[in-house]
Amino acid sequence: MDEDSNHTISSIAIGDAQRKIEETPAGQIQPPVASGTYQVDESVINALPVPNTEILQAFNYGESLWGKTAKLMVKLPSGETEDYFLKPADPNKLAPRLADMHLRSKSPTGKFGFHISTCHARIAQAVDTWDNSWCGLFTRHLGHIMELAKPILNWLEFDVVCRLTLEKVVPRLLLPLQADGRVLKPSLIHGDCWDGNTAMDAATGEAFVFDVCSFYGHNEYDTGNWRAPRHRLSNKAYIRSYKRHFPVSEPAEDWDARNLLYSLTFNIGNTIYIPGSQQRQVVYDDMTNLCKMFCPEDLKAEMQKLRRSSENTAHGHAEVGANKRGDETPEEEEEEEEEEEEEV
């Protein structure tokens, strides 16, 4: 294996649950259809990248689970007009620009986090703090998403692997990034970089991104969302191109496991908020695999404890039922027998 591809291609296999429900999309994306007029808010006009841009036309365009989407046809102060058409960004265009943002960005505090809580779809991310430790911030971020998921999934085994992932796996994989003299740069990250949030400028051929939920974190976090086969960015050309512009963080041998860990926030969010999501078993399997890799004895002990607890609970219910029957008077027992005979 050459240096260029080393540590960038997943060796941790996609689980059976994910393999059965996902495959990487192929072929051309059908462009959205423009329909009706769209009322553009004044705050959107004020936020356009070129001041004094005039909106010529606005249409409803495409679909979104979380709100309305639109296509804007604009006239720049120079007199030029611009249109943008969405399609997956080319890996040799997207990866260098994303890596450039990661490399050039500078945290205003020199720490990880953000000055406000940004939102990933419906999830208000727990990143509205400043932390010297990436491990500390990510634990807070992932833990918050897990807590949102627990009452929705109502799954005791899921709760166990969540706790072990936070307590054992996260520090094992993320503390070394800032240990033994290593310095980890807080990079401005997109926060939800998948093919639906990337595009190519039809006029210039340049890639760009949008619909961000940014904060300052480990640059590799953005590539965690590229792991899922359901995304076109899971094509290995994207991660190979990215790594050529931003080398893998040390310890490089942990890259694949870190990538799997970073994918959890996106897949858990998908599980709890995307209608018809089939990611429930996927995230459970992924966390279980990480626990088997880094805390197998703890996982075994916790699952045995859970089984014993479940057995004791079932045994207790059985005893309560037996005791209840034993407390019956002879008359009550005779009545029950008569009722049973009648039913027969």
Image (cartoon, rainbow, N blue to C red):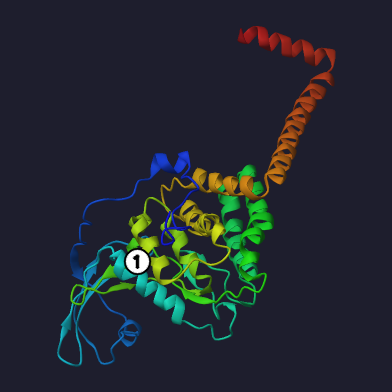
Q: Residue at x 30, y 70 (%)?
A: 93
Observer-nearest of 282 and 40: 282
Amino acid type, residue under disc 1 in the picture = Asn
Q: Position of residue 343 (x, y in %)?
A: 61, 10
Q: Position of residue 140 (x, y in %)?
A: 63, 66
Q: Is residue 213 left or right of residue 136?
A: left
Q: Position of residue 269 (x, y in %)?
A: 49, 57
Residue 68 visible in this rendered orientation of the protein: no
Q: Residue at x 71, y 35 (%)?
A: 307
The image quarter in which residue 195 lies: bottom left
Q: Is residue 55 above or below residue 339?
A: below
Q: Is residue 80 left or right of residue 271?
A: left
Q: Residue at x 60, y 75 (%)?
A: 183
The image quarter in which residue 202 lies: bottom left
Provide the residue designation for mark 1.
Answer: 197
Q: Is residue 303 left or right of residue 209?
A: right
Secondary structure of the residue carrying tag 1 is helix
Residue 106 visible in this rendered orientation of the protein: yes
Q: Is residue 146 above or below residue 89?
A: above
Q: Residue at x 46, y 54 (%)?
A: 270
Q: Is residue 236 left or right of residue 72?
A: right
Extreme residue in the front direction: 2
Which of the image's four quarters has the C terminus? top right
Observer-nearest of 38 and 6: 6
Q: Position of residue 131 (x, y in %)?
A: 64, 76
